[in-house]
Image (spheres, rainbow, N blue to C red):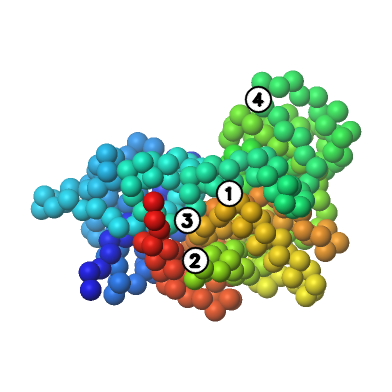
Amino acid sequence: MNKKNVAVVMGGYSDEYVVSLKSGQLIYDSLDRELYNVYSVVILKDEWSFVDDHGQKIPMNKADFSVEMQSGYILKFDVCFNTIHGRPGENGELQAYWNTIGQNYTGCDFYQSALTFNKKDTLAVLAKYGITSAKSIYLRETDSIDPETIVKDLGLPLFVKPNQSGSSLGISKVKSIEEFPEALNSAFAQDDEILIEAFLDGMEVSVGVVDYKGTTTVLGITEIVPQTEFFDYAAKYEGASEEITPARIDEKTRIKVEEVAIRAYDSLGMSGFSRSEFILVDGEPFMLEMNTNPGFSPTSILPQQATHFGLSIQELCGNEVEKALNKTH
């Protein structure tokens, strides 16, 4: 049997590249070596590199995403396993490039990636499918901003978020009008568009959804109990939160959350790993965002949910590779 060449592509242009390297390492370690030749490719702002078993870097040929080995052999990949968080792997740029050169890859297509990376547009599209979200105001950096009017409209506390950013970078919980300027600066440092959202007092849950063997499947619902004010970067990646899988919700709520998460995934035409964040208020799910390249390090939520569901990481990752191999262009 000819083994397929799989490149696990990790890194990225944002501060999230550190998390992506951990996610990529887990996927690299987990793929079945009986079926695949597994390689490591790191994409950073200033270099795209093939990394060999000894940690030696060889520049990638961006014309066709190949690499010339020291022997002179040109290595090409049957599948790229996209595990980049943030730009360019989660916002559609890399997918559009791969489409152009005819390179197969895991996960969703460039349109779904670009759409879901934009919180405002995602929530606007999902509203058409009956999926609710918090009341919000969208602002550009060039807009005149009147905090008093915003507070009057949305109340306090409220959240200020970059419209396009991951890992909760640049998000602030604003409890008083005096905290507004700093929150705006923090959000605009990440993006020139921001969302200001009304505070929802409820339970935060994270729902892992994948298409496994042709069926849209909820891996699990995880309850997030942050030790910080909200599920921020420290809570996500530095252990400052308790993550309870399955979430402590009744059967009726569980069924409703699963149904809404599946509807969101299918409505957007998603593929591959996804993690949707909701706040449950009196049993009603309000959507915060959808991640198309969620964290996949050993401490991340999706691997925890897969284990709870009874799927090994090897099976879950193998399913992604096989889907990519069977894609028709």
Tell me the residue that label 1 is attached to.
Answer: 167
**Secondary structure beneath label 3:** loop
Q: Give coordinates of residue 35: x percent, y percent.
A: 30, 72
- Residue 189's label in the rendered image is none
Label 1 and label 2: CA atoms lie apart by: 16 Å
Give the quarter of the figure containing the N terminus.
bottom left
Residue 3, above or below 199: below
Asked if 146 appears above or below 322 in the picture, the reply is above
Quick one: 235 or 250, which is closer to the camera?
A: 250
Residue 61 placement, left or right of 284: left
- Hey, what amino acid is under mark 4? Glu
Q: Judge depth for marks 3 and 4 and give the one in front.
A: 3
**Of the residues under marks 1 and 2, which one precedes in the sequence?**
1
Q: Residues within 10 Å of mark 2 (few under 14, many from 20)?
A: some
Residue 11 rendering spot, x and y as whole percentages: 41, 48
| The disc label shown at residue 107, or none | 3
Q: CA distance from mark 3 to mark 1?
A: 19 Å
Earlier along the polypeptide chain: callout 3 or callout 1?
3
Disc sitting over residue 298 in the figure:
2
Eyeballing the image, is 286 above or below 182? below
CA distance for labels 2 and 4: 37 Å
Callout 3 amino acid? Gly
